Image (cartoon, grey):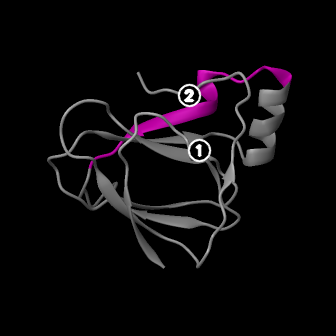
């Protein structure tokens, strides 16, 4: 399935993982608010253990500021069970949109951050 995603939130309410790979196609208009993709450096079970132990830190994530329509960086596959989420910068302007391909009805297993918060600064 090809899905169009418009991100209009500065937070990460749907940060989580899927049980199958997901292809990202960062094609879009260049005149929108910035889009950030945050990816955990750990698979979902290892991330959950760090959250439970209280040892989670900023080094457990990578934040990408998306450059749309770039042949070198705009097309990639995110592996299954890797937690991730998207957020748009706050402020005026249009919300950014992009595309993902995924199998039909691919479930999202949300990450329970407990007392942790996730923000792009």
Question: Is 70 rendered above or below residue 88?
Answer: below
Q: Secondary structure at mark 2?
A: loop
Q: Name the residue that disc number 1 marks.
A: 15
Whether pointer 1 and pointer 2 mark residues with C-beta atoms closer than 8 Å, the reply is yes
Is residue 63 magenta-colored?
Answer: yes
Residue drawn at (79%, 20%) of the image: 54
What x and y, as percent, mark residue 106?
Answer: 63, 70
Toward which corner of the image does residue 108 lie, by quadrant?
A: bottom right
Q: Earlier in the sequence, mark 1 or mark 2?
A: 1
What x and y, as percent, mark residue 48?
Answer: 79, 38
Which of 75/90 is in front?
A: 90
What x and y, as percent, mark residue 53?
Answer: 85, 23
Category of crowding for the residue at label 1, using alpha-carbon neighbours closer than 10 angstroms: few (below 14), some (14–19), many (at least 20)? many
Q: Is residue 104 left or right of residue 7?
A: right
Which of 20/94 is in front?
A: 94
Q: CA distance from mark 1 to mark 2?
A: 9 Å
Q: Secondary structure at mark 1?
A: loop
Is residue 94 magenta-colored?
Answer: no
Q: Which residues are magenta?
A: 53-67
Q: Is residue 69 left or right of residue 64?
A: left
Exactly how many numbered labels are in the figure? 2
Toward which corner of the image does residue 29 lie, by quadrant?
A: bottom left
Q: Residue furthest left?
A: 31
Q: Name the residue that disc number 2 marks.
A: 118
Question: Is 20 rendered above or below residue 15?
Answer: below
Residue drawn at (31%, 30%) of the image: 90
């Amino acid at each position: 399935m090809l899905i169009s995603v418009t991100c209009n939130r500065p937070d990460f309410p749907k940060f989580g993982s899927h049980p199958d790979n997901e292809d990202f196609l960062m094609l879009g208009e260049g005149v929108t608010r910035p889009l950030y993709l945050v990816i955990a450096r750990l698979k979902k079970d290892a991330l959950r253990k760090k959250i439970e132990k209280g040892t989670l830190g900023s080094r457990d994530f990578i934040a990408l500021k998306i450059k749309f329509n770039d042949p070198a960086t705009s097309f990639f596959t995110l592996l299954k069970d890797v937690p991730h989420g998207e957020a748009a910068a706050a402020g005026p302007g249009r919300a950014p949109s992009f595309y993902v391909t995924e199998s039909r009805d691919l479930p999202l297993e949300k990450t329970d951050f407990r007392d942790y918060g996730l923000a792009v600064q």
